């Protein structure tokens, strides 16, 4: 059995971060205040423009009020499911931004 690609693993983490924030009923600005950063930084995390390290994941869990071990278990469980079509569409928008007409 082959290992999943790093792109796949990172995308799963991005999706879980967004889902966890939304399930907590928080906006990006709320999480940003809890992390002591800007809302745009939280957006970059959710859209794959910033890769979170373990310490940032831990701080994120604190900011949204989720136990780190529960978050890790959810991440592990998410690896067993495929990425939904809607998530792939969001990924395409991040990877291929729309061209601006002049």
Image: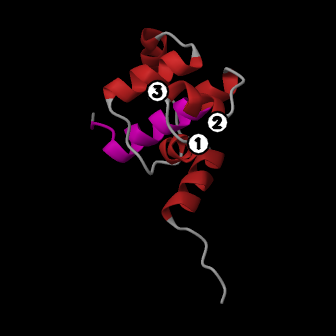
Instruction: Quickly name the residue at label 3.
Output: 80
In the current view of this chain or complex, which residue is farthest to the bottom? 102
Between 29 and 24, the one lying in front of the other is 29
Q: Which mark is residue 29?
A: 2
For the point 41% across and 46% down, which residue is it? 50
Residue 55 rendering spot, x and y as whole percentages? 33, 24
Lower position in the chain sequence, tag 2 or tag 1: 2
For the N terminus, which image quadrant?
top left
* Distance of label 2 from label 1 (alpha carbons): 5 Å
For the point 44% across and 51% down, which residue is it? 49
For the C terminus, which image quadrant?
bottom right
Find numbered disc 1 in the image and state the secondary structure of the residue it sits on: helix
Find numbered disc 2 in the image and state the secondary structure of the residue it sits on: helix
* Distance of label 3 from label 2 (alpha carbons): 31 Å
- Marks 2,1: beta carbons within 8 A: yes
Q: Is residue 7 magenta?
A: yes
Instruction: Quickly name the residue at label 1.
Output: 39
Residue 76 rendering spot, x and y as whole percentages? 42, 21
Q: Crowding near pointer 3: few (<14 within 10 Å), some, many (20+)?
A: few
In the current view of this chain or complex, which residue is farthest to the left? 2
Q: Is residue 14 magenta?
A: yes
């Amino acid at each position: 059995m082959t290992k999943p690609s790093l792109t796949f693993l990172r995308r799963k983490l991005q999706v879980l971060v967004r889902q966890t924030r939304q399930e907590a009923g928080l906006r990006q600005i709320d999480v940003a205040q809890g992390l002591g950063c800007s809302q745009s930084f939280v957006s970059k995390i959710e859209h794959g423009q910033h890769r979170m390290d373990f310490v940032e994941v831990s701080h994120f869990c604190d900011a949204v009020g989720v136990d780190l071990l529960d978050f890790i278990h959810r991440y592990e469980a998410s690896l067993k499911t495929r990425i939904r079509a809607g998530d792939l569409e969001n990924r395409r928008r991040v990877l291929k931004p729309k061209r601006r007409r002049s």
